[in-house]
Image (cartoon, rainbow, N blue to C red):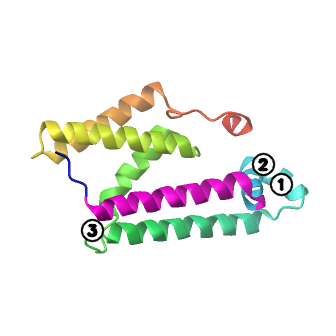
Amino acid sequence: MIGISSIRVAIFVLALIFLSLFLFIVKRTRLGLEVRAVTQNPGMAASMGINPDRIAMLTFGLGSGIAGIAGIAIGLFAQVTSELGQGYIVQSFMTVVVGGVGNIWGTLAGATLIGGLSKVIESLNPANTLAAQTFMILFIIIFIQFRPRGIILQRGRAAEA
């Protein structure tokens, strides 16, 4: 039997809410359109009247806000210390690399793949989580050899850069 605490379910729901909010902002608002324009071609966006510095500032603020909420969520079930993020930074990097840099759906697919595979490896030998991490790093290295741009490839002009 699998036991999942109610706080983890609440954090998952919170993550889904903020993912939906983020996707709405990026896909359906003027700010999202301007962010995509500046990301693809800052010079052209500036010539169209978009201030790239303002967009960079707003994007940084949005990302920092989401990171702050994630930090609060992690603090709900983990002991908050100065080393709290060290256990997550490598997995986060691997998730983005496997999913494809700049692709939200790829990042979600990468997170699902890495999380699932990690738990399967840990279930084979629960006492040795270091072996699971080592196998995951080897998997990432092999994966990058065959799919250097990630699981889900970007389409359009962003893929050409």
In the rendered structure, find residue 41 and report the number of the disc placed on it.
2
The residue at the point 83 percent across, 54 percent down is: 45
**Residue placed under numbered mark 3 in the picture:** 78
Which of the 4 image quadrants contains residue 157?
top right
Label 1's element? Answer: helix
Q: Which residue extends farthest bottom?
A: 81
Label 3 sits on a secondary structure element that is loop
Q: Type of residue at label 1?
A: Ala
**Side of 127 relative to 151 (left or right):** left
Frontmost residue, 97 versus 66: 66
The reply to whether the C-beta atoms of the residues labelled 1 and 3 are less than 8 Å apart is no
Q: What segment is highlighted magenta in the picture?
A: 5-30
Q: Residue 159 magenta-drawn?
A: no
Q: Is residue 152 above or below residue 34?
A: above
User: Does 81 sit above or below residue 29?
Assistant: below
Amino acid on which disc 3 is placed: Ala
Check disc 1 and report the residue beneath it: 45
Residue 117 percent coordinates (x, y): 30, 37
Q: Nearer the viewer, mark 3 or mark 2?
A: 3
Q: Give me the residue at 46% from left, 39% from top.
A: 109
Is 67 or 85 nearer to us in this picture?
67
Earlier sequence position, callout 3 versus callout 2 = 2
